[in-house]
Image (cartoon, rainbow, N blue to C red):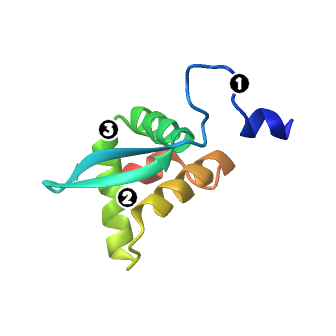
């Protein structure tokens, strides 16, 4: 069971826990966010359901982290994904 999570499955796709860096423009400035593939897919799905682009969703999360004095956008993205999975946050909360 754990071996399936940690070892290659023979698939051409890297496992969900591999990190990807993506460049995003936030208020006109380019920045890079590094997240595991699974979190990128969850954010893409949340953006789609919220009817906003992924960069716009990340910009909103960035603004939230700045407002509360946090400085780790990647951590905020992960926590939002987990809260969406738990049902303690709704997609509508991300755009209101």
Q: Quadrant of residue 69?
A: bottom left
The residue at which mark 3 appears reads as 52
Residue 8 placement, left or right of 68: right
The residue at which mark 2 appears reads as 61
The residue at which mark 1 appears reads as 9
Pointer 1 with pointer 3, Cβ within 8 A: no
> 15 or 26: which is nearer to us?
15
| Mark earlier in primary sequence (1, 3) | 1
User: In the structure shown, which secondary structural element does the residue marked by tag 1 occupy?
Assistant: loop
- Residue 77 location, x and y as percent? 47, 55
Task: Tell me what residue is drawn at x 78 percent, y 32 percent.
Answer: 4
Residue 96 visible, this orientation: no
- Residue 61 location, x and y as percent? 37, 58
Disc 2 or disc 3, which is closer to the eye? Answer: 2
Mark 2 Cα within 10 Å, few/some/many (few <14, many 20+)?
some
Residue 60 placement, left or right of 7: left
| Mark earlier in primary sequence (2, 1) | 1
| Mark earlier in primary sequence (2, 3) | 3
Task: Tell me what residue is drawn at x 34 percent, y 40 percent.
Answer: 54
């Amino acid at each position: 069971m754990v071996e399936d999570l940690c070892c290659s499955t023979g698939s051409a796709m890297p496992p969900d826990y591999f990190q990807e860096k993506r460049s995003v423009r936030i208020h006109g400035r380019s920045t890079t966010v590094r997240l595991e593939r699974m979190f990128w897919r969850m954010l893409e799905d949340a953006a789609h359901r919220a009817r906003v682009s992924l960069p716009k969703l990340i910009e909103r999360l960035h603004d939230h982290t700045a407002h509360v004095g946090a400085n780790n956008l990647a951590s905020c993205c992960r926590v939002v994904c987990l809260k969406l999975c738990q049902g303690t946050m709704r997609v509508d909360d991300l755009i209101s």
